[in-house]
Amino acid sequence: MADIHIEEFYKDAAIALVQLYNAFPRRINVFVEDIAGADEPDEFGLHSKRHMACFGTLLWLAEEGLLRYVDTIRQEALDQAVLTQQAFVRMSSPASPDLQEQEVAAGGAELPPAIREDFSTHIHMLRTALRSGSSAKISRVMQATFFRDSDDH
């Protein structure tokens, strides 16, 4: 993928969604700094483009119905954020067969069926993609998790 800002969007969204899933159903504060790294505002108090892009990703996820929050904490965080029912169900559901095949190819075929079932979920695929550090894998998993028609699954 040539557009770095889109790769960063997918990574920021994946990190935020995994944080929220890991805390579900508790409400938590989601800090931009925990996702995009430390940022020093300039002499006018303005954040970097990278920081603002991550903050924009969090707001976009809320606008698209994937998370809810009570308020923003300046441009630093979302206060009392939680996944929506739609996002929780989607992340807990089995991933598409093509993503599952990639997991099996990576050594998942020898696992017991119950564990293989856990490993087939979107949340597992997101965690695995983030651990890999591969922008292409993160983008592919995010697209499969949230941006493809749910009739494909």
Image: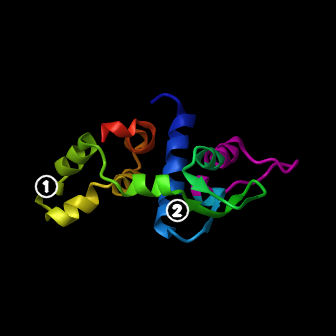
Let me know if residue 116 is in the magenta part.
no
Q: Earlier in the sequence, mark 2 or mark 1?
A: 2
Q: Residues within 10 Å of mark 1 (few under 14, many from 20)?
A: few
Residue depicted at 45% across the width and 58% down the height = 88
Let me know if residue 46 is in the magenta part.
yes
Residue depicted at 63% across the width and 45% down the height = 63
Q: Is residue 110 left or right of residue 21?
A: left
**Residue range (magenta):** 35-57
Residue that sits furthest to the top in the current view: 2
What residue would you read off at disc 1?
A: 109
Residue depicted at 34% across the width and 54% down the height = 93
Mark 2 or 1: in front is 2
x and y percent of residue 142 in the render? Answer: 43, 43
Give the quarter of the figure containing the C terminus.
Answer: top left
Q: Mark 2 is on which residue type?
A: Leu
- Colour option used: rainbow
x and y percent of residue 17 in the render? Answer: 50, 55
Q: Mark 1 is on which residue type?
A: Ala
x and y percent of residue 125 in the render? Answer: 34, 52
What residue would you read off at disc 2?
A: 20
| Camera-side residue of 108 and 50 | 108
Question: How many numbered marks does the figure carry?
Answer: 2
Give the quarter of the figure containing the N terminus.
Answer: top left
